[in-house]
Image (tube, helix red, strand yellow):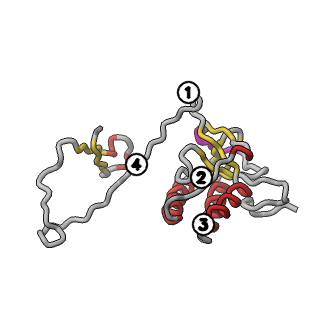
Amino acid sequence: MTNPDPCFKDTPGSRITAGLLLALLCLSLLLSAGCARLIPPVKEEPALPLVLVKERKLPEFFDDMSFDALSAAIDQSLAYLRSKSPETQFRFGEETYSATHMIRSLENFTTFLQTRPDGAALNRFIRANYHVYQAAGNRDPGRILVTGYYEPFLKGSHHKSARFQYPLYTRPDDLVSVNLSRFSEKFNGETIWGRLD
């Protein structure tokens, strides 16, 4: 009999897979899990250059921050996946997973994180429930560029006080703005700011 929830094992010898990117755990590794039964592709996302890591070569997984930060990152991935058609297919190495399956897999991981596992429990859970993929690189195998974004939120006041003592006189010369509506109508009225390095 088949388990109706693809996030759990059917038999002791089976292995679960699901698309799961957890850069916070290890920048060079991507987690993913999936099912033997796959929904026929309706739309497929671009293939990621990933290589399945053999079980004997798996690293030790740990989170040196609070699990709240990892849960917030998973929530961002869930928001993205929920914006896709449930039938959208994602390729990880030689495997393909639907958006629906990836959502279930991330929800399963989030439920596990709520138990506040120690390092040993985290490693057992990942090894028992997920396949691990390593980013391989497209043009130069073994070399990849990982980028990240930081958006600070600063509080201010229109009036001087003990807390807000220093005025902002002008915009810094090296601060640039980008009108996002130039890239797509869906970003009409949105602007991002940054410093050109």
Question: Mark 4 packing: few (<14 Cα in 10 Å), some, or many (20+)?
Answer: few
Q: Nearer the viewer, residue 165 or 169?
A: 165
Q: Is residue 5 left or right of residue 188?
A: right
Which disc, if any, is residue 113?
3
Task: Kindly identify the amino acid type of the residue bearing the numbered disc 3.
Answer: Leu
Label 3 vs 2, first from the N-terminus:
2
Label 4 vs 1, first from the N-terminus:
1
Is disc 3 placed on a helix, strand or loop? helix
Label 2 vs 4, first from the N-terminus:
2
- Calculate the distance from the C-alpha at mark 2 to the C-alpha at mark 4: 26 Å
x and y percentages locating residue 108 in the rendered image: 65, 63
x and y percentages locating residue 96 in the rendered image: 69, 44
Furthest-right residue in this view: 1
Q: Which residue is mark 4?
A: 149
- Calculate the distance from the C-alpha at mark 3 to the C-alpha at mark 1: 35 Å
Residue appearing at x 29%, y 46% in the figure:
194
Q: Identify the magenta region.
A: 41-47
Quadrant containing the C terminus is top left
Residue appearing at x 60%, y 65% in the figure:
110
Q: Which residue is mark 1?
A: 140
Is disc 1 placed on a helix, strand or loop? loop
Task: Kindly identify the amino acid type of the residue bearing the numbered disc 1.
Answer: Asp
Tell how many labels.
4
Which disc, if any, is residue 85?
2
